[in-house]
Image: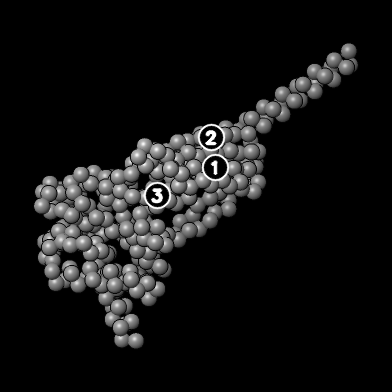
Amino acid sequence: MRMKRSIALAMLVFVGLSVLVSAVEWAEFQAFPAVAPDPFTGTPSLIFSLGLSYDERPDQMHIRTSWEIYVVEDGEHVLLESYARTSPEMRGAEKVYPASPRVSIETGKRYLATVVVEDLVNDLRHEHAFDFLAPLSLPLGIHLVGADGSEAYDLTGLPDEELEELVLLHRLLANDYDRVAEGVEIATMLSDHSGDEENYPMSALLIPTDGLSSEVGPEDVPITLTVAQILFVYSIPSSDAVAGFEDQVADFERKFAGFVYVGPGGEGFGTGKVIFLHEPVWAVLEAASAEHARRRDE
């Protein structure tokens, strides 16, 4: 009789422990692709992001993440990146934010990604598949090192090639283009000019971030990140590219007001028959010309 009671008690303890182990659950609360210029090369790139939220904060977590990213070429899936990482076991957080490696992308191509996220301590697994068609307008970028928007731009660290691109654009706007509007929102510019194919290619130069600091990670052990400013440069080749461009601008969740220029167009950096220049960009162009003159006089 005592033997049966001991076995029954052991089974109850085992069941109780199993319930405790499996009590924590998680659910996906966000999944999206993010297009941005590569901070090192300035070329268009793509990162896939996922967000998982626990129903209650676990005591510990041990996350293993695996990514596979493909581009579709002639109907075939061509592997671009395969990545797996297991983080050290650590104190639990309310949410986890897996992000893929950055991959370079081209307009109009289709990109697929699969991510598997596991919490080895809490016996959890989640898989998500992404399917992204790159728009016909993708941003180039110039990383404004050390700039946070709080004071005049210091471009002493900008490479010569990027500085010269900005200087040339500044000269073109001053000498070959007419400023036809100022203080207008980008949506207004598109409404006024995007319907006429003779206005293409158009371009838009934006600084989407304010360069402010923010905190990420667990509330009790936050990590402070300072977001440097990046100049986004879009070429809009035709009316077919407008919708994809508007979607990218909408993702910034802010309004852009600036200047509208009309001119001869061309194939140079940031040029087009119609150019939208976000107001802070003019200060960048002026700073670039001043820095170029300083280097020339050295």
First in residue order: circle 3 vs circle 1: 3
Local crowd size for mark 1, using a 10 Å CA cut-off: few (<14), some (14–19), many (≥20): some
Residue sitting at 12 percent across and 63 percent down?
Answer: 264
- Label 1 – label 2 distance at C-alpha: 11 Å
Q: In the picture, which quadrant includes the N terminus?
A: top right
**Residue in the picture at 45% in, 47% down:** 80
In the rendered image, is residue 190 in sight?
Answer: yes
> Which residue is most to the right?
2
Cα separation between marks 3 and 1: 17 Å
Is 255 displayed left or right of 3 in the figure?
left
How far apart are the two marked residues, 2 and 3, measured between alpha carbons? 22 Å
Residue type pointed to by label 3: Leu
Badge nearest the viewer, 1 or 2: 1
Find residue 66 and name its label: 1
- Amino acid at the residue labelled 1: Ser
Secondary structure, mark 3, is strand
Q: Which of the two labelled residues, at mark 2 and mark 3, occupies the earlier sequence position?
A: 3
Give the number of the disc on residue 126. 2
Q: Nearer the viewer, residue 253 or 43?
A: 43
